Image (spheres, rainbow, N blue to C red):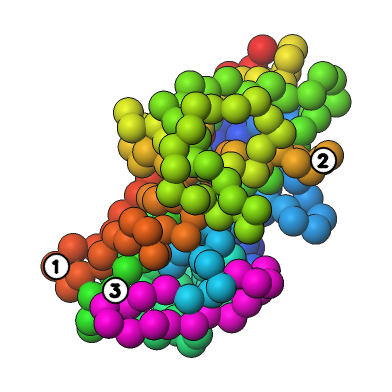
Amino acid sequence: MDNEDITLTAGGAEARVSPANGGRISGLRIGDLELLRQGHRYGCFPMVPWCGRVRDGRFLDGATVRQMPLNAPPHAIHGTARDGAWRTARASAGEAVLTYDLTDPWPHPGRVTQVVALAEDSLTLTMSVETYGDSFPAQIGWHPWFHRNLGGADVTLDFEPAWQEERGPDHLPTGNRVDPKPGPWDDCFGMPGGVDVTLTWPGELELKVTSREEWVVVYDEQAEAVCVEPQTGPPNGLNTLPRLVTPLEPLEATTVWSWRRL
């Protein structure tokens, strides 16, 4: 199948999926409310095969040091798949399955599969990475740009992390865990029981972002948007907490966004 945009519908919910533009969710409309920012830095893109920044774009792959392009100098950020064209494997009214083949500059051949499933009160995103050959370290995550404001008061965030990764001057975790600090944030938090963050646009909508994964990056330093990013490890995790994709064991992760009108 081609990689034209796909529109999923369920009840009063509509999700737009853009395979050709990094496999991103380009829009999510609940009734008359568009939740995801449009224009520059928009929608929700998959972060794979790594999340956030990799220090100096380098990571240890077995005994080999790999160098990724520095797309956020001096670091590499958010993986390679968001810059590529994904393919539509299949699509129905409420579900789309997309695939992306890992290629240069990533050194290992592999395939990423993302399933986007829409219900009238939730969106479920599931991603997996499998290897065509050697084992390799990887991460999975999602980077949504939620509107800070839907027409009324600004969104509020409610979550109870067990810790915050101390952030160094290079924006990367130092390795120390500290008590959670007040925002604004461009920070990674640990939630060992699973990611559970509630966004509330007063008088309009409540949205819960959940995942079995225990890491979430919250970025709210932009005036227009708030990002809540569940992921399988912290920034620079290819170096500090690698998850191995093997021929027998792919890397998989899921996040669910569930909502109710207020």
Distance between the alpha carbons at the discs numbered 2 and 1:
43 Å
Percent position (x, y) of residue 129? 33, 65
Q: Residue at x 49, y 55 (%)?
A: 235
Question: In the picture, which quadrant includes the C terminus?
Answer: top right
Q: Which residue is mark 1?
A: 248
Q: Is residue 182 above or below residue 216?
A: above
Residue furthest to the left: 248
Residue 237 image offset from top left, x and y in percent: 41, 58
Counting other residues with Cα less than 10 Å from the Cα at mark 1, is it few (<14), some (14-19), or many (20 or more)?
Answer: few
Residue located beneath label 3 in the image: 136
The residue under label 2 is 224
Q: Give the spatial CA distance, label 2 vs label 3.
A: 37 Å
- Range shown magenta: 59-75
Is residue 182 a member of the stretch shown in magenta? no
The secondary structure type at the circle numbered 1 is loop
* Amino acid type shown at disc 3: Phe
Q: How far apart are labels 3 and 1 at the CA level?
A: 12 Å
Front position in the image: 101 or 50: 50
N-terminal label among 2 and 1: 2
Q: Earlier in the sequence, mark 3 or mark 1?
A: 3
Q: Could you say where residue 122 lies in the image, as x and y percent from the top left?
A: 50, 32
Amino acid carrying mark 2 in the image: Glu
Q: Assess whether mark 3 and mark 2 are in contact (beta carbons under 8 angstroms).
A: no
Q: Nearer the viewer, mark 3 or mark 1?
A: 3
Where is residue 45 shown, x and y percent of the image? 59, 57
